[in-house]
Amino acid sequence: MSVLDSETRINASLDDIWELYSVADLRRKITPGFLFELKEIKGPDGDHGPEVLETGSTVAFKTWIDFDQPLVLRIVERERSDDEAMFREEMVQGSFPKWTHTHRFRTVGDETVVHDHVEYELPDKCWPTGQLIWPLAIRAMFWMRHKSVKQEFTSNFTLDLDDADIGIDL
């Protein structure tokens, strides 16, 4: 199993960050299309295009790893308190034997720390080339996602490479 941890600080309130990750249309804005093309979002009751992503909602992506089979993630847990929030997605359909993505948000002063923790296993058909490419592609995706989130809240955004903490354990 491989693990990716990615963390960054955003100059925005927890309320604003939570809304960005909870509203389906906003979620599209921060998902880099080069690796995962967002195809469909359904609510817990199966309705297409819900306004808010809740526990039971599903998000379907098309990936370059398997164009014939979408990667479908279901939100299995979603919690919010005054200074922390989290939600967890698990793959319910797709090529990966395992994909669990936990999003955590916490208030630190006037900022919000955004932390992504992904546990995944690559499909057998990815060996050996995919074993080298996928960790880099996934790391790039989270770097771009965090950059996009920062851009949502900063009019004079500049990228600070020292600000992102992205680690991959293979």
Image: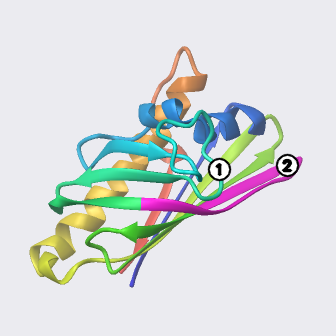
Q: Secondary structure at mark 1?
A: loop
Crowding near the residue tagged with mark 2, few <14, some 14–19, many ≥20 C-alpha atoms within 10 Å: few
Is 114 colored magenta in this rendering?
no
Question: In this rendering, would 139 be left or right of 132?
Answer: right
Q: Which of label 2 and label 1 is nearer to you?
A: 1
Q: Which residue occupies the extreme top position in the image?
A: 155
The dominant secondary structure in magenta is strand
| Residue at 80% from the left image edge and 46% from the top image edge | 108
The picture quadrant where one finds residue 111 is top right
The structure residue drawn at horizontal position 23% and vertical position 43%, both measured from the top left corner, is 34
Q: Residue furthest right?
A: 82
Q: Nearer the viewer, residue 61 or 130?
A: 61
Give coordinates of residue 162: x percent, y percent.
50, 46
Residue 153: give x, y in percent of width and height: 60, 24
Q: Which residues are magenta?
A: 73-88
Quarter of the C terminus within the rendering: bottom left
Q: Determine the image quadrant of residue 30.
A: top left
**Regarding mark 2 in the picture, which secondary structure is present there?**
loop
C-alpha separation, residue under disc 2 versus residue under disc 1: 19 Å
* 55, above or below 156, in the image: below
Q: Is residue 76 magenta?
A: yes
Q: Nearer the viewer, residue 54 or 102?
A: 54
Which mark, residue 15? none
Q: Could you say where residue 92 lies in the image, as x and y percent from the top left?
A: 42, 69
- Of the residues shown, which amino acid type is indicated by label 1? Glu
**Quick one: label 1, few (<14), some, or many (20+) residues within 10 Å?**
many
Q: Residue at x 51, y 50 (%)?
A: 46
Q: Which residue is mark 1?
A: 54
Q: What residue is pinned by disc 2?
A: 83
Q: Quadrant of residue 137?
A: bottom left
Q: Is residue 139 left or right of residue 77?
A: left
